[in-house]
Image (cartoon, helix red, strand yellow):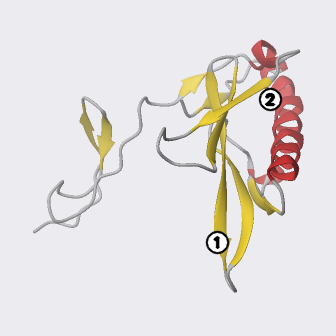
Amino acid sequence: MSYAFEPRLHSRGFSFGDGGAGFSLYWAMPPIDVDPHRFTGKTFTRRLTWPDRENDYVAIIDGLRAARIDLTMFAGSVAKWGWSITGPYIPPELQPSQGAEDTLEAAQEAFKAKFWQWHEWALQVAAKGEKVTWYA
């Protein structure tokens, strides 16, 4: 049995481990470079992450998944709306890229505030001719 965590390319993405007794982690596509100008003036849409699971959403902008927002139980049986930016690379100076709020609306607003903060940073990076990475 192998527990090496070497990435292996598969038709569905990459896996780590031996694919049997180990575990596999798949994502749809490798990272892409984006022009952050494409998001200027755009709005987010929200849809269920899984058709059979309530209270679990993805936020999409210009056709790309930007975040996940879901109702999560925390210590002490406290339910909070967790949000996490899942699309753009978030540099250390803009961390944290996730949080938890009491309501779905508050989680959406917190996520959007962080996204537009990232957007300003990304525009500056692009202006210097550097690449902006998105985990599609």
Q: Nearer the viewer, mark 2 or mark 1?
A: 1
* Residue 116, position as x, y percentages in the image: 87, 34
Q: Which residue lies most toward the bottom here?
A: 76
Q: Secondary structure at mark 1?
A: strand
**Label 2, label 1: how far apart the Cα atoms are:** 33 Å
* Residue 39, position as x, y percentages in the image: 79, 18
Q: Which part of the image, by quadrant, shows the C terminus? A: top right
Tag 1: amino acid = Met
Tag 2: amino acid = Ala
Q: Which part of the image, by quadrant, shows the N terminus? A: bottom left
Disc 1 packing (10 Å; few <14; some 14–19; many ≥20):
few
As drawn, 55 above or below 72: above
Q: Which residue is mark 2?
A: 122
| Quadrant in the picture for residue 122 | top right
* Residue 7, position as x, y percentages in the image: 30, 47
| Quadrant in the picture for residue 43 | top right
As drawn, 58 above or below 128: below
Q: Which residue lies most toward the left here?
A: 1
Q: Which residue is mark 1?
A: 73
As drawn, 116 above or below 85: above
As drawn, 28 above or below 92: above
Q: Residue at x 82, y 17 (%)?
A: 42
| Quadrant in the picture for residue 112 | top right
Disc 2 packing (10 Å; few <14; some 14–19; many ≥20):
many
Q: Residue at x 76, y 20 (%)?
A: 36
11 left or right of 84? left
Q: Secondary structure at mark 2?
A: helix
* Residue 61, position as x, y percentages in the image: 71, 23
Q: Earlier in the sequence, mark 2 or mark 1?
A: 1
